[in-house]
Every structure is written in structure tokens, then in C-alpha cells.
Image: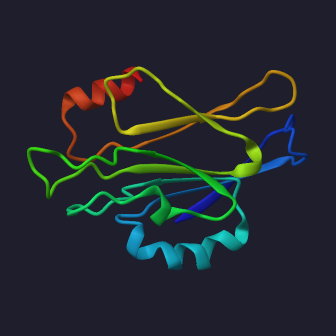
Amino acid sequence: MNSSSFVDNASDFNQHDLNCLNTNADSLLNKLDEFKSRFLHEKPDIIDITEVLPKSMKYVISKAELDLKGYELFPSNWAIEQSNPGKTKRGIVIYIKSTLNASEVDIDSEFSESVWIKYPLLGHDKPLFGCDYKSPSSSEETHIALNNL
């Protein structure tokens, strides 16, 4: 897991550095307590995580199970495949501080493993922030769809 920052000079939440944290969890639910203890003391503004769900699951994980106090959760790809209930998409989430008043952005794309949000700055600026996941074993069609996105 790693974290980074970038400068946001026009923020309406009176902060100049927007701290972001990005990781691939390979099943977050069984690591959530460790994640909270290791990284939430940094109080990142945005957290994006790929492979949130286990490779095989028997039930759909609810948003409440992944709740982080002070953050709004934007998930993507939570459905269990009807033709193969043991197999599912791996899931993506973006957590963003509730004080940033973010909203999800629906982007029409053939690439389904992504989630996008925007949040208001001073004036009319609304930065677009996204998280996507492409498996190393993805097909050429998936590569093309991601590039088109």
C-alpha cells in the first residue's frame, strides 16, 4: 500500500494538499482492521482500492461492511455472476472524505471495472477522479475498452 499527494490550490475545504491513498487489497474485508490501523491515522482525503472482493464469494458484501467513519463510499462491480455464483468481479471502491461533498459520475463505457467521482472546488471547478482495474489476464477487447475510456 502506498500514499501520495498532489497540490490543489483552489480547494473550498481550506486545504492545499489533497492526500490520496491507492492500493490493491486482494480482498479488503479480511484486512479492513489492519487497513484502518495502518493508514487511517494519515487521514487521506481520497482512498481508492482495487480487488476489494475475494476471488470467490457466496454472498454479496454490503456497503455497510466496508464503512469507514468520515468517508463516503463509492463502489463498483459488486454483482455475483448468475451463471457462476462462486465467481464475481473483484470490485473497486473510492472512499472520499464526507466533507468534500463528492458525487458519482456515470461514464458510458464498455470498460466496466471503474468508478468515477467529482467534488466541488471554489467557483465552478469540479475535478474528476477515477479508479479502474484491469486484470493482467484481460483480453485485447478489454484493453481497447480501457483505452477508449
Determine which quarter of the picture holds residue 108. top left
| Vertical position of residue 128 compared to residue 78: above or below | above
* Residue visible at 34% across and 44% down in the picture: 77
* Residue visible at 48% across and 72% down in the picture: 32
> x and y percent of residue 79 in the render?
28, 46
| Vertical position of residue 70 compared to residue 98: above or below | below
Between 121 and 99, the residue placed more toward the observer is: 99
* Residue visible at 46% across and 56% down in the picture: 63
Determine which quarter of the picture holds residue 24. bottom left
Quadrant of the drawing holding the C terminus: top left
> x and y percent of residue 90 in the render?
31, 52
Q: According to the image, what is the colour scheme of the structure? A: rainbow
Q: Judge from the rendering whether residue 5 lies leftward or rightward of residue 85; answer left or right.
A: right
Q: Judge from the rendering whether residue 102 lies leftward or rightward of residue 133; answer left or right.
A: right
> x and y percent of residue 102 in the render?
67, 39
Q: Judge from the rendering whether residue 129 lies leftward or rightward of residue 83; answer left or right.
A: right
Between 78 and 21, the residue placed more toward the observer is: 78
* Residue visible at 25% across and 61% down in the picture: 59
> x and y percent of residue 39 in the render?
62, 71
In this figure, what is the number of numbered marks? Answer: 0
Q: Going by the picture, which residue comes out furthest to the right?
A: 14
| Vertical position of residue 42 compared to residue 84: above or below | below
Q: Judge from the rendering whether residue 127 lies leftward or rightward of residue 12; answer left or right.
A: left
